[in-house]
């Protein structure tokens, strides 16, 4: 993340690791097939290491960086995943060494110009850069309405301004690579109402609301969520917004 790193997640890194949804395995199969080689991938702003671990079965070596040491401390370990505390713009990775760069739910926090310069430094020719994000859940009409009202209501003023990039589906984020039209993917998990509430509590707006007011806003909507949910598990879906490009070094 940028040198002026605004840390919205370290204070609840353990919750973040436990409550955030996973990405589809097909996404990582797709990115590995696009990559010019499978020697080394860089998962930038790795958080709890979710994408890094998913890539571990496809690449010889994964370098996973995050500006937050707390996130790194809670990240899932694999033998070929090497975690380092480093901002996105100054990774410490060797030049001309990376075949794939992934940025999961994080590029909107970066200093764009400095990050893209770092990508061009570390990437091999024809390396793939993939950035993705996801917005609000899709569950049932009734549950979705409660979550939407919560998102746009009491906690809305507590969203960082960078959230606007997610709302625009990353269309306004610079992505100076040879872009392709990516395959489409969707995230899906089977959750209980309790799991959804745990996920909502990881929102940066919720954490900022709690810090400012001393109150948990999720508790206020929990009864309505439970009533609308009913018993048991439900499928929870998110559309995945994916940007994919190729670094063309020999034309620079």
Image (tube, rainbow, N blue to C red):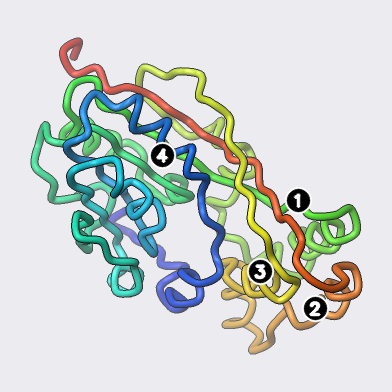
Work out whether residue 188 or residue 241 is closer to the camera in this orientation and state it: 188
Residue linked to disc 3: 200
Going from N to C along the chain, the mark reached first, 2 or 3, is: 3
Q: Residue furthest left?
A: 94
Indicate the position of residue 117 as horizontal and vertical percent values: 23, 34
Q: CA distance from mark 1 to mark 3?
A: 13 Å
Q: Earlier in the sequence, mark 1 or mark 4?
A: 4
Question: Mark 2, residues whose alpha carbon is within 10 Å: few (<14), some, or many (≥20)?
Answer: some
Mark 1 vs mark 4: in front: 4
Gap between marks 3 and 4 measured at Cα: 26 Å
Q: Which residue is mark 1?
A: 138
Label 3 or label 4, whichever comes before in sequence order: 4
Q: CA distance from mark 4 to mark 2?
A: 34 Å
- Residue 178 placement (x, y as % from top left): 36, 17
Q: Which residue is mark 2?
A: 222
Secondary structure beneath label 4: helix
Q: Nearer the viewer, mark 4 or mark 2?
A: 4
Helix or strand or loop: what does disc 2 sit on? helix
Which residue is at 61% across, 61% downward? Answer: 159
| Above or below for 232 versus 248 | below
Q: Which residue is mark 4?
A: 28
């Amino acid at each position: 993340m940028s040198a002026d790193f605004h840390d919205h997640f370290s204070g609840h890194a353990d919750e973040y690791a436990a409550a955030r949804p996973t990405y589809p395995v097909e996404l990582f199969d797709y990115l590995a097939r696009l990559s010019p080689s499978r020697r080394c991938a860089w998962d930038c702003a790795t958080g709890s290491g979710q994408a890094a671990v998913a890539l571990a079965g496809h690449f010889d070596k994964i370098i996973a960086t995050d500006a937050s040491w707390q996130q790194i401390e809670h990240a899932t370990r694999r033998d070929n995943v090497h975690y380092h505390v480093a901002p996105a713009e100054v990774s410490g990775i060797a030049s001309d060494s990376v075949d794939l760069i992934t940025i999961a739910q994080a590029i909107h926090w970066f200093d764009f110009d400095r990050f893209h310069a770092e990508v061009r430094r570390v990437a091999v020719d024809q390396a793939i850069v993939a950035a993705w994000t996801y917005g609000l859940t899709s569950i049932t009409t009734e549950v979705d309405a409660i979550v939407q009202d919560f998102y746009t209501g009491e906690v809305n003023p507590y969203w960082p301004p960078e959230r606007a990039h997610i709302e625009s589906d990353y269309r306004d984020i610079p992505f100076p690579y040879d872009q392709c039209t990516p395959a489409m993917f969707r995230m899906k998990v089977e959750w209980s109402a309790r799991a959804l509430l745990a996920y909502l509590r990881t929102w940066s707006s919720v954490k900022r609301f709690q810090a400012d007011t001393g109150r948990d806003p999720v508790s206020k909507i929990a009864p309505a969520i439970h009533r609308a949910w009913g018993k048991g598990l439900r499928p929870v879906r998110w559309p995945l917004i994916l940007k994919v490009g190729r670094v063309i070094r020999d034309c620079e």
